[in-house]
C-alpha cells in the first residue's frame, strides 16, 4: 500500500521539479505535490503546461515501485502503460461526477467530446487533462516514478489562453456549472487518491488487463481517422484501439501498424468533417 501524504505549495516552477527533489529527500511513495500555480509547468515532449492560479489542479505523485517489479513484470518498456492507467482513472472520476462524454486519448490525454456537431476546422475534442511520466533511479538503486497530472478546472471564459490552444481547452466548470473551483479541485484530488491508487496497485499486481478492458469503453481514437507522429515519421489511418501492451493500433492502406511511442497529431471522426 502507498501513503496519501499531500504537500501544498503556493507557487512553484513545476510540481515535477519539486517532486523529484522531495523523492531524493526520501518522501514516501504516495506523496502528492500540489501547487496553486506553476511558473514553468511541464507538458509532454518538452511543452509547457499553462498553470495560472485558479485554473486547475497541478499535482505530481511520487511512486516507488520495487526494483524487481519495475524490471520484471512492469519493466521500463511497459512503463508508458502507467500513463493509460492514469488516463482511465481520470476518466472514471469525471464520469462519476456526471460527465458522460469524457474519453481517453492515447497516450496521455483526457478529452471531452463535443455534444453538438462542430464547424469544419474546429476540434471534435476539448482537452480536459494531461499526464506526464518521468522515471529515474536513486544512488541506492531505488526506482522512482513521477506522475504529473494537470486537470483543467476553471471555466473557459475565465481563463486567458493563447489563441493556439483556446479552441481545445475545456474545464470541469464548463461541464459542471454551479460548482466552485475549490470544491472541484479538492474533489478531484481526493478521488485521484482513491481511484488512481486502486488502479495503480491493480496494475502492479495483475498487469495491464483491467486497464485495457476499461480503456475500450472510453477510447477517444477508435474508428477515427488519425495522423500519428513517430518522431518525424507519420502514420495515417483508422484507429483500431490499443493492444494488450498499450500500443496504439492504426489500420493503414498497407496493413496494421502498432505505435508505442509518439503522439496523435490529428483526429477526424469518420462521420464528421471536423478535426
Image (spheres, rainbow, N blue to C red):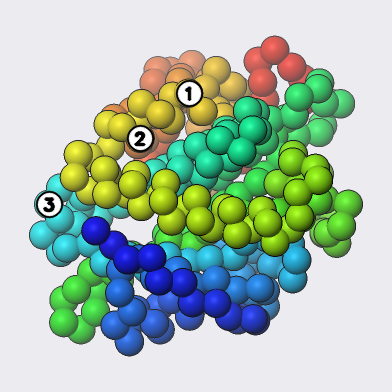
The residue identified by callout 1 is: 217
Could one spot residue 236 in this view of the protein? Answer: no
Image coordinates of residue 262 in percent, x first then y, are 47, 46
| Marks 2/1: CA–CA distance | 10 Å
**Is 99 on the left or on the right of 159, as rendered?**
left
Tell me the mark number nearer the camera, choosing from 3 and 1.
1
| Marks 3/2: CA–CA distance | 19 Å
Q: Is residue 15 above or below residue 216?
A: below
Q: Cβ–Cβ below 8 Å for labels 3 and 2?
A: no
**Is 61 on the left or on the right of 66, as rendered?**
right
Q: Residue 4, which numbered label?
A: none
Tell me the mark number nearer the camera, choosing from 3 and 2.
2
Could one spot residue 85 in this view of the protein? Answer: yes
Q: Residue 211, which numbered label?
A: 2
Image coordinates of residue 21 in percent, x first then y, are 40, 84
Residue 163: image quadrant is bottom right
First in sequence: mark 3 or mark 1? 3
The residue identified by callout 3 is: 72
Q: Residue furthest bottom?
A: 25
**Is 224 on the left or on the right of 163, as rendered?**
left
What SS does tag 2 mark? helix
What SS does tag 1 mark? loop
First in sequence: mark 2 or mark 1? 2
Residue 275: image quadrant is top right
Q: Residue at 26% across / 43% down in the picture? A: 202
| Marks 3/1: CA–CA distance | 29 Å
Q: Name the quarter where the N terminus is drawn.
A: bottom left
Image coordinates of residue 205 in percent, x first then y, are 18, 45
First in sequence: mark 3 or mark 2? 3
Residue 2: image quadrant is bottom left
Q: Residue at 39% across / 44% down in the picture? A: 85
Amino acid at each position: 500500500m502507498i501513503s496519501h501524504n499531500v504537500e501544498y505549495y503556493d507557487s512553484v516552477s513545476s510540481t515535477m521539479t519539486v517532486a523529484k527533489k522531495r523523492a531524493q529527500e526520501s518522501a514516501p511513495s504516495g506523496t502528492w505535490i500540489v501547487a496553486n500555480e506553476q511558473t514553468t509547468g511541464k507538458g509532454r515532449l518538452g511543452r509547457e503546461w499553462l498553470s495560472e492560479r485558479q485554473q486547475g489542479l497541478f499535482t505530481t505523485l511520487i511512486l516507488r515501485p520495487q526494483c524487481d517489479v519495475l524490471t520484471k513484470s512492469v519493466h521500463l518498456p511497459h512503463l508508458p502503460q502507467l500513463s493509460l492507467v492514469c488516463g482511465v482513472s481520470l476518466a472514471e472520476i469525471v464520469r462519476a461526477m456526471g460527465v458522460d462524454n469524457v474519453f481517453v486519448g492515447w497516450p496521455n490525454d483526457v478529452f471531452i467530446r463535443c455534444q453538438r456537431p462542430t464547424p469544419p476546422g474546429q476540434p471534435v475534442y476539448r482537452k480536459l487533462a494531461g499526464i506526464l511520466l518521468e522515471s529515474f533511479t536513486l544512488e541506492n538503486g531505488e526506482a522512482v516514478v513521477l506522475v504529473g497530472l494537470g486537470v483543467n478546472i476553471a471555466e473557459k471564459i475565465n481563463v486567458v489562453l493563447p489563441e493556439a490552444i483556446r479552441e481545445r481547452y475545456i474545464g470541469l466548470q464548463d461541464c459542471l456549472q454551479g460548482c466552485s473551483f475549490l470544491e472541484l479541485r479538492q474533489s478531484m484530488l481526493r478521488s485521484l487518491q482513491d481511484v488512481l491508487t486502486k488502479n495503480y496497485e491493480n496494475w502492479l499486481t495483475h498487469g495491464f488487463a483491467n486497464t485495457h478492458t476499461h480503456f475500450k469503453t472510453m477510447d477517444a481514437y477508435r474508428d477515427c481517422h488519425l495522423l500519428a507522429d513517430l518522431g518525424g515519421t507519420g502514420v495515417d489511418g483508422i484507429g483500431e484501439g490499443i493492444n494488450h501492451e498499450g500500443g496504439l493500433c492504426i489500420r493503414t492502406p498497407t496493413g496494421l501498424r502498432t505505435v508505442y511511442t509518439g503522439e496523435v497529431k490529428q483526429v477526424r471522426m469518420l462521420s464528421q468533417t471536423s478535426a
